Image (spheres, rainbow, N blue to C red):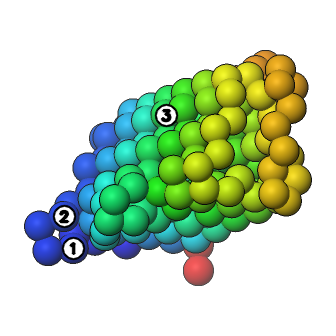
Amino acid sequence: MPIYALGSQEPTIASDAYIHPQAVIIGSVTIGSESSVWPCAVLRGDDGEIIVGDRTSIQDGSVLHTTPDLWTRVGDDCVIGHLVHLEGCTVLNKALVGSNSVVLHAAVVGNGALVAASAVVLGGTQIPDGAMAAGIPAKIREGKSSPEMIAMGAASYVERGHRFAKDLRRID
């Protein structure tokens, strides 16, 4: 799997995290226990740091990046869906960012919040705990998240990471 240092910037990855062989991890990236990074995801910590908590999935094709002033942080028990772009933002614990969404500079996705698929969360947006953000640009809907669905998604990716670490083998 391509894991790169960039000068003195080296990734720190928990020993029980699952990183798919086709994911790319570069520079100042920290990945927590039982988290997973899936095919074609790119976490590029060159300008600042990317921190991914425990039991969080970064799914296929997602891109996490930073700015020199704004790190990208993703909490524990989060689901970052397929083709998501996170840039200099914070996603707090037990949140879900749906497939094909974009969350931009200085935005904060609250605890247990949900960003709907294909939403664009503009820079500086604050999504309250338990709220849902949907649309382009994203509009906030208080209390519309689904904590049970997020928890099930996070748990399924923890299990999937264990399965892939044990059973994935290339056959070509």
Q: Tell me whether the residue at label 3 lies in contact with that at label 1, contact meaning CB atoms closer than 8 angstroms.
A: no
User: Which quadrant is the N terminus positioned in?
Assistant: bottom left
Q: Secondary structure at mark 1?
A: loop
> Horizontally, is 14 left or right of 149 in the view?
left
The count of marks equals 3
Q: CA distance from mark 1 to mark 2?
A: 5 Å
Q: Amino acid at mark 2?
A: Gln
Residue beneath the point at 79% across and 19% down: 148
Q: In the image as oriented, which residue stretches furthest toward the front?
A: 124
Residue 9 image position (x, y, % from top left): 19, 64
Residue beneath the point at 58% across and 70% down: 40
> Horizontally, is 10 left or right of 107 in the view?
left
- Name the residue nearer the viewer: 84 or 111: 111
Residue 125 makes an appearance in the image: yes
Residue position marked by numbered label 3 in the rendering: 75
Residue position marked by numbered label 1 in the rendering: 6
